Amino acid sequence: MGKRILVVDDHSDTVDALVDLLEMEGHEVRSAVTAEHALALAETFEPHVVMLDIGLPNMDGYELAAHLRFKVEPDCLFIAATGRGAQSDVLRSKKAGFTAHLTKPIDIPELLALLTSAPDDLVLDR
């Protein structure tokens, strides 16, 4: 069963590709290219999963995640998507409460496995 996934990245090509892929996998997906748009979407979309680019302009992914936590369910999964893959970056995202840290370019099988392993209660009612 699919999940509601919010994809946030300032590169529209990346967003478009991820949205297409995730929708083909049966997920309901919304996207944002700015932190402000992501905050607005989170209030009405109620995502099960938030996939965040860490290197966003104006508000980085860590700060955005902190704000989003007040707008989503407590069991919402946060996935960091970033070009930074050093061990210190992985530790920082873990400390910030991200469930997973994926380095760009995103390993699609790894992303899909992560979504599949998410708790069964994080699925769309169909």
Image: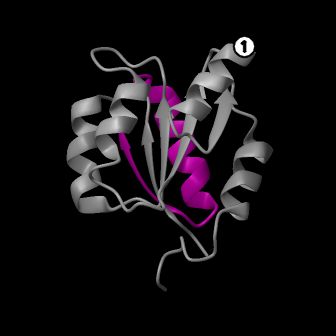
- Splitting the image into 4 quarters, where does residue 24 fall? bottom right
Mark 1 nearby-residue class (10 Å; few <14, some 14–19, many ≥20): few
Q: Is residue 44 above or below residue 14?
A: below
As for residue 25 lying within the magenta part, the answer is yes
Q: At which x and y percent is residue 44? A: 23, 60
At horizontal 30% and vertical 60% (from top left) the residue drawn is: 45
* Side of 119 where 8 appears, left or right: left
Which segment did they paint magenta? Answer: 10-32
Q: Is residue 104 visible?
A: no
Which colour style is shown? one colour
Q: Is residue 25 above or below residue 121?
A: above
Residue pushed farthest front? 95
* Side of 48 where 32 appears, left or right: left
Image quadrant holding the N terminus, namely bottom right
Q: Is residue 88 visible?
A: yes
Residue pushed farthest bottom? 126
Q: Is residue 105 above or below residue 4?
A: above
At horizontal 22% and vertical 56% (from top left) the residue drawn is: 43
* Side of 106 where 77 appears, left or right: left
Q: At which x and y percent is residue 66? A: 35, 37
- Splitting the image into 4 quarters, where does residue 80 fall? top right
Q: Amino acid at mark 1?
A: Ala
Element type at mark 1: loop
At horizontal 73% and vertical 62% (from top left) the residue drawn is: 117
Q: At which x and y percent is residue 119? A: 64, 69
Q: How many marks?
A: 1
Q: At which x and y percent is residue 68? A: 32, 44
The residue wearing badge 1 is: 86
At horizontal 63% and vertical 75% (from top left) the residue drawn is: 120
